[in-house]
Image (cartoon, rainbow, N blue to C red):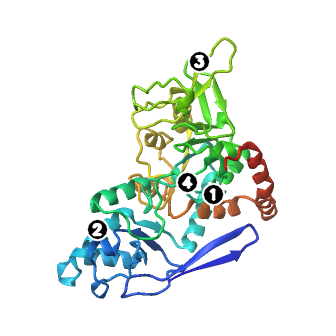
């Protein structure tokens, strides 16, 4: 059972969820407690009989648990004497790969107070962002329970097509990038930058939402490119467009990239007098080298930082993820992501001098955390004015994008 409740708060409408734990031995509401959400094979695919199941699985393979119930369930799968069926063991093992964790509201608020103090006492705070900050804008992530690579792995494991009528994301196919708008997190980072509390943004995203939110070009390194930018392959001139830059094969002399084997040319030519070089998209595909200039600027700020806000990223993509360790020691790091990362232990380290925890680790949605952080940083009147200004900012975003219906 899933009940959606809308609470109208002063700063903005917030959508909360009241979800019943689907572990049959529990069945209690998860509201106010840490929870875990998973997606696995569809019960129909594995042949699981409902009467023998320990979980009330949705037909799509989705399930939500108290975090403690999820731990108990996974432990049961290790002990055959508990009578867990082979079909359900298979489902739970797959579900473990997709598990997303959400801290309770009380813990998020508590950590937000710590994080806001860390930000306000930092001398060179930077942000390192990934796909997770854009999911609420309509962009799919990669390794979440409905992530692009997760879905591909699951399909490969079953060898069967999905039969559920529930929608399953297929990467970002069908997403109209021109219609996407900055999330609360995008806008919060821009505000912190304007206040001088944030010095630089390093992003792995290509959706263009950081730049659309108002972050200046010299304050961000978009390591993997920007879908709205193109550059001249001859003179290096760059152009920022109001539309997503795509290759138009009918208008372009194809030239496959030697690294990724994909054609980067867009069909347009450089506008600089006397150049006439072909324009290319700026997207870094698998196999491509990162551009030197944004990587050098990112490394420069990473080395100066005394606090890095890692938001919506699994921190698995190299060499970008190596940047978060380049700061002043001991490295102070906030990680907000739904799934664990290899860098989580760094957040819990204790400073030998102050005997306090160096960083912060929050499981859940970036918008949830950043909303609480901004409450702690901005006075109530200033917060209200800024949040009420989103409607005007939306109009400005709309002017900067060409709609493509």
Q: Which residue is mark 4?
A: 139
Q: Which residue is mark 1?
A: 117
User: At 52% across and 64% down in the image, what residue appears?
Assistant: 364
Which of marks 2 and 3 precedes in the sequence?
A: 2
SS state under label 4 = loop
Disc 3 or disc 2, which is closer to the eye? 3
User: At 47% across and 53% down in the image, what residue appears?
Assistant: 171
Disc 1 or disc 3, which is closer to the eye? 3
Q: Which residue is mark 3?
A: 277
Which of marks 4 and 2 precedes in the sequence?
A: 2
Question: Viewer-proximal residue, 124 or 194?
Answer: 194
User: At 44% across and 49% down in the image, what residue appears?
Assistant: 315
Labelled pair 1, 2 in contact (Cβ < 8 Å) = no
Q: Which residue is mark 2?
A: 93
Mark 2: few, some, or many residues within 10 Å (few <14, many ≥20)?
some
Q: Position of residue 370 (x, y in %)?
A: 63, 59
């Amino acid at each position: 059972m899933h009940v959606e409740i809308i609470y109208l708060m002063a700063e903005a409408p917030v959508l909360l969820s009241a979800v019943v734990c689907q572990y049959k031995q529990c069945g209690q509401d998860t509201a106010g407690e840490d929870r875990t959400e998973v997606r696995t094979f569809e019960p129909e695919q594995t042949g699981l009989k409902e009467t023998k199941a320990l979980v009330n699985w949705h037909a799509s393979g989705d399930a939500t648990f108290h975090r403690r119930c999820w731990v108990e369930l996974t432990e049961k799968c290790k002990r055959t004497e508990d009578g867990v069926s082979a079909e359900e063991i298979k489902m739970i093992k797959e579900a473990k790969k997709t598990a997303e964790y959400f801290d309770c509201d009380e813990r998020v608020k508590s950590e937000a107070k710590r994080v806001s103090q860390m930000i306000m006492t930092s001398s060179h705070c930077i942000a390192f962002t990934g796909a997770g900050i854009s999911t609420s804008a309509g962009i799919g992530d990669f390794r979440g329970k409905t992530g692009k690579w997760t879905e591909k792995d699951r399909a490969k494991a079953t060898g069967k097509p999905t039969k559920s009528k529930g929608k399953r994301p297929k990467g970002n196919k069908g997403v109209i990038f021109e219609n996407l708008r900055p999330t609360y997190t995008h806008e919060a980072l821009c505000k912190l930058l304007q206040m001088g509390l944030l010095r630089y943004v390093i992003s792995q995203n290509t959706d263009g939402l950081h730049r659309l939110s108002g972050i200046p070009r010299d304050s961000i390194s978009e390591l993997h490119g920007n879908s709205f930018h193109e550059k001249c392959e001859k003179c290096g001139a760059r152009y920022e467009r109001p539309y997503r830059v795509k290759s138009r094969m009918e208008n372009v002399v194809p030239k496959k990239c030697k690294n990724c084997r994909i054609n980067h040319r867009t069909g347009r030519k450089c506008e600089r007098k006397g150049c006439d070089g072909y324009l290319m998209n700026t997207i870094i595909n698998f196999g491509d080298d990162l551009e030197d200039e944004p990587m050098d600027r990112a490394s420069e700020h990473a080395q100066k930082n005394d606090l890095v806000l890692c938001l919506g990223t699994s921190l698995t993509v190299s060499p970008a993820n190596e940047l978060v360790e380049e700061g002043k020691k001991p490295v102070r790091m906030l990680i907000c992501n739904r799934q664990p990362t290899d860098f989580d232990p760094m957040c819990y380290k204790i400073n030998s001098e102050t005997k306090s925890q160096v960083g912060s680790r929050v499981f859940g949605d970036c918008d949830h955390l950043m909303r609480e952080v901004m409450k702690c940083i901005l006075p109530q009147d200033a917060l209200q004015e800024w949040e009420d200004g989103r409607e005007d900012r939306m109009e400005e975003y709309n002017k900067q994008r060409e709609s493509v219906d």
